[in-house]
Image (cartoon, rainbow, N blue to C red):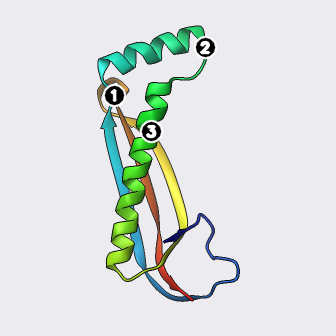
Amino acid sequence: MIKTTTPSIEGRQIDQYLGIVVGEAILGANIFKDLFGSITDIIGGRSGAYEREMGRARKIAFAEIEAQARALGANAIVGIDLDYEVVGEKGGMMMVSVSGTAVKIR
């Protein structure tokens, strides 16, 4: 399945717009990841635990929009938008939301 953030796909014609598809994933960050994330923030550098969780959430959200698009008969998704949010009490959860338009292309 072709996926793009642009409204069209160069060299391909959109034959049919099938509807908006949305995928969301909310993942909790456990206390150990919070602890190690805090240490990383204090001493500098990147938090590998958080990066892995964000990557996992993004994969889940993309899998959801692909499944929805296939169910509509699409072979591509255009205009994809990714949003990242921290939600929950004390920002204890991470959310990834992916949306786009399912289309049939030639």
Give the mark nearer the N terminus: 2 vs 3.
2
Q: Amino acid at mark 3?
A: Met
Residue sitting nearer the eye, 70 or 7: 70
Q: Residue at x 38, y 20 (%)?
A: 33
Mark 1 closeness class: few <14, some 14–19, many ≥20 residues within 10 Å: some
Q: Position of residue 25 (x, y in %)?
A: 34, 48
In the picture, the disc for residue 44 is: 2
Q: Residue furthest right?
A: 11
Q: Which residue is mark 1?
A: 29
Question: Which residue is at 39% across, 64% downward?
Answer: 65
Residue 58 appears left or right of 14: left
Label 1: state its secondary structure.
loop
Measured in 3D between alpha carbons, the distance from the residue under mark 2 to the one under mark 3, in whole angstroms, is: 19 Å
SS at circle 3: helix
Query: Where is the C terminus found, in terms of image quarters?
Result: bottom right
Give the label on residue 54, or none. 3
Seen at 60% across and 18% down, the residue is 45
- Looking at the rendered structure, the secondary structure element under dot 2 is loop
Picture quadrant of residue 56: top left
Looking at the image, do the residues carrying marks 1 and 2 touch, with CB atoms under 8 Å apart? no
Query: Where's residue 12, x and y in %?
Result: 64, 84
Count neighbours of disc 3 (C-alpha within 10 A) and say few if under 14, some if 14 to 19, many if 20 or more.
Answer: some
Q: Vertical placement of 26 versus 106: above or below? A: above
**So how many labels did they put on this image?**
3
Q: Quadrant of residue 89?
A: top left
Who comes first in sequence, dot 1 or dot 3? 1
Q: CA distance from mark 1 to mark 3?
A: 10 Å
* Marked residue nearer the N-terminal end (1 or 2): 1
